[in-house]
Amino acid sequence: MPEKHLKADVTVLGGGPGGYVAAIRAAQLGANVALVERDLIGGTCLNYGCIPTKALIRSADIYRTVTESKNFGCNITGAVFDWSQAQSRKARVVTTLRKGIEGLLAKKQITVIAGEGKVSAPDLVSAGSGNDFTAIETKKLIIATGAKTALPNIPGIDIDGVMTSTGALELKELPGSLVIIGAGVIGIEFAFLFAALGVQVTVIEVLDRPLPLLDIDISAEIADSANRNKIGLFCQAKVAKFEKAGDKIRTVFTIGGEEKTVEADKIIVAAGRKPNLDGIDAKQMNLVFHPDRKAIAVDHGMRTSRKGVYAIGDVTNVFQLAHVASMQGETAAENAMGMDSSLDYSAVPWAVFSHPEIAVVGAAYGNVNQKGVEAKTLKFPFAAIGKSAAYGERRGFVKLYCDSNNGRVMGAAIVGPGAPEMIHEITFAIRHDMTADNIVKTIHAHPSFSEAIRETAMMFDGEAIHFGE
């Protein structure tokens, strides 16, 4: 079949949360856009990560609510969790969202090419599969190829039943027992998901605490919650090997030189990810790499070292977060179309959908004392809030970091109900240089979980109303 030819103002390589957003934004600005995707529109987040995981977590949360309903006066007996139905619902959620994005792309008359994309020059992309290829002559190129799993070199990692998070999302039936390697965001979310469904879960982490990149009080709270939810947690543990043990898989690991073992039906390796550069000849294109991130180097406008070429999302390894990739996609598209846009990373929220939920922003996952500024740390417990008592959600806290000189909000950590929604008040405050006093002078609805944010801010100049030490 002869090669087809296409001319585009902007070509986007990769249709994940960064790529498809970049394509739509460029089309909004009048560009003729081509989008190349080798798998499914929506990328890892929509199809194999964020969305399917949260769909299953929601099912588990409903089941937890039912099993605890007696505490609220509802005597529901005989509740049975149906994993296959939960999986079917998950698939429907993912398909609905993906079709929605495909509809948006079609509405904007974006040419979507299915297959591998290969970049031989900044203005030339070859895309397709088999014998069906299209040569795209493009004025601007946005690289949004994401990241791929970086499995650790552990003997036995290829044993049937050892899987990544992607495999875990496709399990046909619930395992009786499960070992999770890694207590980062992915590992912790899966641990609480499966534990809520009655699976015996053990988590093994090489560093000294769970969620080691976040605030130490978060780690302590999640460790306590893991214990209450009967999740086994081993930290400062190095996995030596996996081996078959009858119909189980044995994980051999060491802590302080002492060898330990645990057997389980399945193992999830919640490993890290590395930038995906498949199909991109970075050397030929003279793309500069960031020495620390080992990824394509970009400025705050997502420009690479090569004029007319932009990179966004996980392939840049700035933040491996879908919402950051989407904002980067908008920024890259605007600059490709002649605007002058840039991103401010001072207020990037993270969320962990564990039980309880977690959210952080700003100084909560970095150096608290920024550029010589001394931070004042304020902490308020959810137990002191009326809605927390009414809803039976009394664990957790709000922790606020403020400039000790003027009260400027620098960051926050929230552990408790609704944390991923609540964090945006603090994100907005950081983004606009607001102070603790600005929060205090803002009326918060009662009863609400967000009252805890205002009470925390009150502690900068004095004491909270509903909590005193």
Image (cartoon, rainbow, N blue to C red):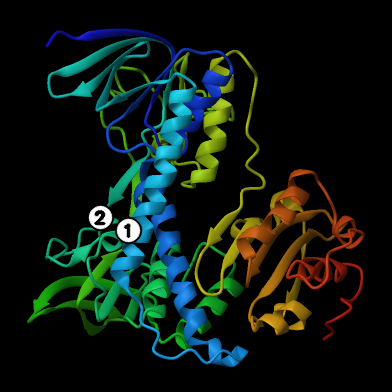
Q: Does residue 147 appear to the left or right of 436 in the view shown?
A: left
Residue 432: percent from left, percent from top: 79, 43
Q: Quadrant of residue 73?
A: bottom right
Q: Amino acid at mark 2?
A: Leu
Question: Which residue is drawn at the image coordinates 43% and 73% (left, top)?
Answer: 60
Residue closer to the observer: 187 or 373: 187
Check the image and report above or below for 33 versus 425.
above
Residue 146 left/right relative to 320:
left
Q: Is residue 269 visible?
A: yes
Circle 1 SS class: loop
Are the residues tagged 2 and 1 within 8 Å (C-beta)?
Answer: yes
Residue underneath mark 1: 271
The C terminus, quarter of image: bottom right
Mark 2 packing: few (<14 Cα in 10 Å), some, or many (20+)?
some
Where is mark 2, residue-wise? 151
**What amino acid does circle 1 point to?**
Ala
Secondary element type, mark 2: loop
Percent position of residue 352, x then y: 52, 63
**Residue 211 percent location from the top left of the image:** 48, 67
The percent position of residue 239, horizontal first and vertical second, equals 25, 71
For the residues labelled 2 and 1, the Cα–Cα distance comes to 6 Å
Task: Decide if residue 36 is on the left or right side of residue 224.
Answer: left
